[in-house]
Amino acid sequence: MSSNSKNRSIVFGGILILTIISGLSGCAPIPTPLPERPKPCEQSSAKMNIYKIPPESWAEKIFQYAFPALPTPLPTETAAPAQLDDQKILEARYATFQYLIKETKRWSDVETITLDDSSEAQITVTFISPELIQAVYLSQVLKYRFFTSDFPTQIQDVLNSISARDELLFLVTVTTTNNGNPNSISHTIDIPISKMKLNNSEDLAIEPNHDDHNLEQPIHSSLEPVFGYLAYPLLSNNECKWILDPKFNTNIVLTVPNILMDGAGDTPYTWTIPYTPLVNGNIPSDAPVYAVPPGFDTNLISTLAVPPNPAMNPNGTNPPSYWQDFARYVWNQVTLGNY
């Protein structure tokens, strides 16, 4: 082969190799940058966490009524005032108990479901609000006489410990008229608890961060009541929106797509709890009621391990005695620290 032929072959071969390399490069996928992970929303306002609030004035007022002469500071952590007025402490406990009942009912909503001609179920959702927490804690302080010379700081520490969760807490309680009655007809109730959504005025529907697994299991109407907690995020990370902004949300609304009764049912259920008034001024709380009514059983100012069975009035509401016992049950649940 002549040198010119060799040169032409080398050039042609080089062109062919370059053409193949160029073709392969053209067929290879162009790498695309990985999508950025969504950054967690920053809480632009401390008010976004509703548990970051100062204590209610009525709580300190009742505490001072019970223990008006505490030295500052106390000589020891367990030191008591020189003279305790048992009657004043009892009256303070009664006043706090009335607040506890009021706040429990205020932050609860009930859905009633007929199981058969002789029994029904109630599913109660209770928002564990800052006001309810303070009523529970003050009830505990007065019952066990936890003396402190700085009660506002003490109750603020309790609120701070709950606000550190960065969640909205709800207690779900399922009771039936036949709880604890093995001779009754047993029905099963299935709640898709992980699909119980918190809805706000911007049509955001948020599923819980955490839920007690026992609420997801089939509930038997003739056995013991079932109760547990749900916890929702303070804001939607997808849209960085405050879920319960009190400027726009006057109600707390929770929904489930259906509840199965004995394996059947496609009816959605809704719980609506008043949240903030449209006119949100600094409206003072009701004055504490210290006078214990004649004949009132003061043993009722105590915790109750299980919720009361439904006791519906003809008009479809639970009587005051029911809410009294339900408040005692909420007191027990919150102070157990079981979640």
Image (tube, rainbow, N blue to C red):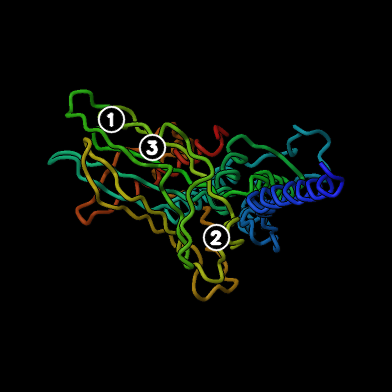
Q: Which residue is mark 3?
A: 307
Residue type (three-letter) at the residue carrying disc 1: His
Say which residue appears at 74% left-offset and 49% top-offset: 153
Q: Residues within 10 Å of mark 1 (few under 14, many from 20)?
A: many
Q: Is residue 65 visible?
A: no
Which amino acid does the dot numbered 3 rest on? Pro
Q: Classify 10 Å Cα crowding around label 3: few (below 14), some (14-19), many (20 and above).
A: many
Using a 10 Å C-alpha cutoff, classify the residue at mark 2 as few (fewer than 14 neighbours), some (14 to 19) or many (20 or more). Answer: many
* Left or right of residue 248, residue 25 in this image: right
- The x, y position of residue 143, in whole percent, is 58, 37
Q: Is residue 142 above or below residue 107?
A: above
**Residue at the extreme left of the image, as rendered:** 117
Q: Which residue is mark 1?
A: 220
| Image location of residue 105, percent across then percent down | 42, 53
Question: Which residue sits furthest bottom?
Answer: 279
Residue drawn at 81 percent across, 47 percent down: 5
Name the front one of labels 3 and 1: 1
**C-alpha gap between disc 1 and disc 2:** 34 Å
